[in-house]
Amino acid sequence: MQAARNLVCIVVLAAAAVAMHADSFTQQSSTKQGFALQQQNSNRPPWAQKNKSADGAGNPTAKAEDADPAQDRGKIKVNVNLVNVLVSVLDEHNRPAPDLPLEAFQVFDEDNPQTIAVFEKETEQPLDLALMIDASLSAQLSMPAQRDAATHFIQQVLRKGDRLAVYSVDENVTQLAAFSDNVGHLQEVVRRIPAGAGTSIYDAVLLGARALSRQGTDRRRVIILVTDGGETTSRADFDSARREAVRTNTLLYTVVIRTMKSESGRNTAGEHALETITDTTGGAVFYPDSSVELDSIFDRINKELRTQYRLGYYPNPRGPADTYRRIEVTVAPPAAVPAQASPGSPDTMQAGSTKTDASKAQPVYSVRHRKSYYTGAP
């Protein structure tokens, strides 16, 4: 009898153990399935998602995703974004070349020709400008001329809808005036820029690009940096500054005030770094021989900003997220147009005759534009 009771107890305990094991297995399976669904629901573009089953059976979350167009739009937004390229076209005398037709331009994305979807001969996009003045001790000699040229530029460049902020650049980068169109206030701030010590050029580019990116979309972002080129105190490095300028689509114009004309004793490495960043963004570097030239340089920048072409295209093929893509824009000169012969020349003896003016050579254009763009986070 006692043996029978013991046998019953053993059977009951075994059944309980089996039930507990089955429950544990069910919980583990449920946990794994939940983790898989969580992975499937992560905010990733469609091409980065794990493969789904053919019918989606047993995966209600995946079906819900498919039925949510808002989520789908969010996922592919990076891939279909319009890429805007501001293009400055200059003739052989460094003057803006206006009124070129759409047909004169070609755009290449990673060497692939693109269809231009947006074309503006003189872009209507308003400007956000970060005017950055080197206030280091080494730049103080030319500071009076810098102030005069900068105040004149502010008066010239700001139009309806534009905004400008003033920064001093020394061992720190300090915003002295917020983005506004108050010309008088901005000019007064420039006249009172205090003297500093070091020069943080990379910090200026990085922080200026970030500040501009916060001002809104569908606006042109421009940094105008006046400096002696002597990088000394930045916390950021060259790569991070250039990357931020590209990521935010910021255009950089640099005016390098060289207190010493000879390369010995000058920070030529800083100058070369600025040239590289500026060229990457599609801007220009100016080296005035004297501070007297600052006014004319600011005039050139103003005219260039007012005669920029705006090209837009949808990348084809689309680049993967979180990558930098290379852009190239070429401009073909217009075909030679036969010139009318002057009255009284032998060519006018026959009605309607024309001759080509051989003295008119094809124009040679220099083209500036940003060299790459960031596709966006995945």
Image: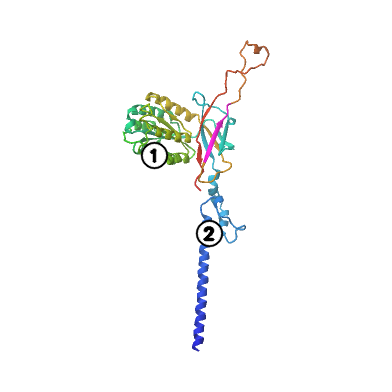
Count of marks overlaid on the render: 2
Q: Name the foreground residue: 115 vs 261.
A: 261
Please tell me which residue is depicted at 50% across the width and 63% down the height of the picture.
Answer: 31
Q: Gap in Å between the C-alphas at discs 2 and 1?
A: 43 Å
The secondary structure type at the circle numbered 1 is helix
Residue 224, image x and y in percent? 42, 33
Kind of residue sitting beneath label 1: Asp
Q: Position of residue 312 (x, y in %)?
A: 55, 37
Name the one closer to the observer, 73 or 337.
337
Q: Which label sits on residue 36?
A: 2
Hey, what amino acid is under mark 2? Ala
- 136 on left or right of 43: left
Q: Which residues fall within the magenta stretch?
A: 325-333
Observer able to see residue 36 = yes
Q: Nearer the viewer, residue 161 or 42?
A: 42
For label 2, count other residues whose C-alpha is less than 10 Å away and answer few (under 14), some (14-19) or many (20+): few
In the orientation shown, which residue stands out farthest toward the front?
Answer: 264
Magenta stretch: includes residue 134: no
Q: Is residue 30 above or below residue 12?
A: above
Q: Are marks 2 and 1 in contact (CB under 8 Å)?
A: no
Q: Can the viewer see residue 161 in this picture?
A: no
Please provide percent x and percent y for residue 203.
39, 39
Considering the numbered disc 2 on the image, is that residue within a helix, a strand or a loop? helix
The numbered disc on residue 203 is: 1
Q: Residue at x 48, y 29 (%)?
A: 304
Q: Is residue 81 or residue 47 the one in the foreground?
A: 47
Tell me where residue 68 appears, x and y as whole percent.
Answer: 56, 53
Residue shown at 52% from the left, 77% from the top = 15
Question: Tag 1 or tag 2, which sits nearer the N-term?
Answer: 2
Residue 290: which disc?
Answer: none
